[in-house]
Image (cartoon, rainbow, N blue to C red):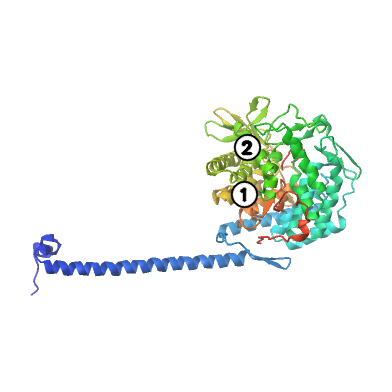
Amino acid sequence: MARTRSSSSRFRYCNPSYYLKRPKRLALLFIAFVCISFVFWDRQTLVREHEMEISKLKGELADLHNSLEELKNVEGKVVKKTQNDVPADPIAIQRREKVKEAMLHAWNSYEKYAWGQDELQPQSKSGVNSFGGLGATLIDSLDTLYIMGLDEQFQKAREWIANSLDFNKNYEASVFETTIRVVGGLLSAYDLSQDKVFLDKARDIADRLLPAWDTPTGIPYNVINLAQGRPHNPGWTGGESILADSATEQLEFIALSQRTGDPKYQQKVENVITQLNNIFPEDGLLPIYIDPHRGSTSYSPITFGAMGDSFYEYLLKVWIQGNKTSAVRRYREMWEKSMKGLQSLIRRTTPSSFTYICEKNGDSLTDKMDELACFAPGMIALGSSGYGPNESQKFLSLAEELAWTCYNFYQSTPTKLAGENYFFHPGQDMSVGTSWNILRPETLESLFYLWRLTGNKTYQEWGWNIFQAFEKNSRIESGYVGLKDVNSGVKDNMMQSFFLAETLKYLYLLFSPPSLISLDEWVFNTEAHPIRIVPRHDGVDFENTGEKQKPNLKLRGRKEGRSRD
């Protein structure tokens, strides 16, 4: 018959007094406890080490997968990814492919209906020469095609440029637009491919633009006839030069001097900065009209939107282009002055506290911001690292606040596409002013920089939402179109060349590894054409770097009245 224990007998081993009366048992129990603890601790250590080893192996496997995904043979040269790349993100890869497909749709439509002309009119399935018949969309698209690995399309475009592109046009060209789109596009294609046909063509068109700088001050006229010269300013400016149009050629012409060894291009554009520095105010903010004869400013708006924007952008980017050496320090100093001035234009809405940049007329501020000014968050973020830790964080936070406002330019309309500009009202946040959308890239540009510089995937999500809105509202069977009204969704009949040059490129890079066009090796011009960074040193700026140095690529895979698109 089995014996049963009483309740008190069953739990006596839980009573400390039981062991106090039996010291030998207590000692044995202590020793057993210590031994079991060591075994348990050792087991846990082994488990942790095992888990760490598994995690390490998984990371190595992800890196190998990423390498297989991202390594690309370009022109017979295998280009490797860098060590600091994050493991491949399947969602980002999928989205990148969607953007690539959008680029193919835009390009194939252009090729089918407007080949060799400046821009496609998708609804009428015809081409239009908005820039004098220079093949603007074709040249603007070169680096996008190359970066996306669309080699067949790139080679066909290259053949057209080599055999059909002719700059001897009796056309009154914008010096600014021609520089950023054509000179910039050709130089970028050269830096990426090292194909000299692009450099030769860039030099040809730049030589046709050079007489524009032949003014008493060296501040250029903004219009020139490509065949006959005869530079002048448009009548609607009263004979004055536009700030952005006159001081947004530095990246391209400095690069051209570096690649060719001919100093004349750089000398022309750097003299402009010297002249502007002579009249540069303490707040670093210049009005949009400059007298090319006297080098003085006139009473006119101050803005980070149309006709002012890219002047400030290039102050920062020439400093980056020169690898931040002492030879380009004055550009950084001027830019930092301008950022002090920009802070004086910052206001916040009620009730939602959206941060925005005002425009200024004399001493009064206007509560208006162009979508064009949405390049500023990216510019500020890009320049923030040049400050000390506290200032750097302050400017990065400002960039993030402004980007949130720009994203809401899109989110606040029925089509989820932004209008051309916005007004801000006490207690009512914002309202769209001019309500068209012409496929602009500025907000996406800033999201790209913020993602690259912070690693915050929120910016990828915002960019994806904007891309989906373009797909829903702007994509048609024969290309992409803008909207006449972001409220009604009525479509226009133009596929702007910058949609392929900028909008789709920034979207593609937003979902690509950071080493694809690394910001340590490349700087983007204002048309999103990447130009290789070349360190500058006083007195040795013209060494024909294009011939001496091959690009270390990490490849895987505005404009008048609209001053910066």
- How many labels sit on residues? 2
Which amino acid type corresponds to the residue marked 1 in the rendered image? Phe
Q: Check the picture and name the quadrant holding the N terminus.
A: bottom left
Q: Give residue 436's quadrant in the image.
A: top right
Which amino acid type corresponds to the residue marked 2 in the rendered image? Met
Dot 2 surroundings within 10 Å: few (below 14), some, or many (20 or more)?
Answer: some
Name the residue beneath numbered marker 1.
448
Q: Check the picture and name the quadrant holding the C terminus.
A: top right
Name the residue beneath numbered marker 2.
339
Q: Give residue 295's quadrant in the image.
A: top right
Query: How far is disc 1 from disc 2 in space, using C-alphas?
Result: 21 Å
| Residue farthest to the front, as pictured | 539
Residue 163: x and y in percent read: 87, 58
118 is higher (above) or lower (below) than 24: above
Whether residue 122 appears in this view of the structure is no
Position of 122 with respect to 353 (left or right) is right
Residue 10: x and y in percent read: 12, 65
Decide which of 88, 188 is in the foreground and name it.
Answer: 188
| Residue farthest to the right, as pictured | 228
- Disc 1 to disc 2: CB gap under 8 Å: no
Position of 172 with respect to 541 (left or right) is right
Q: Give residue 311's quadrant in the image.
A: top right
Whether residue 24 appears in this view of the structure is yes
181 is higher (above) or lower (below) than 301: below
Disc 1 is placed on an element classified as helix
Residue 361: x and y in percent read: 68, 27
User: Closer to the observer: label 1 or label 2?
Assistant: 2
Q: Which mark is residue 165?
A: none
Dot 1 surroundings within 10 Å: few (below 14), some, or many (20 or more)?
Answer: many
Instruction: Mark 1 or mark 2: name the one nearer the start of the chain.
Output: 2
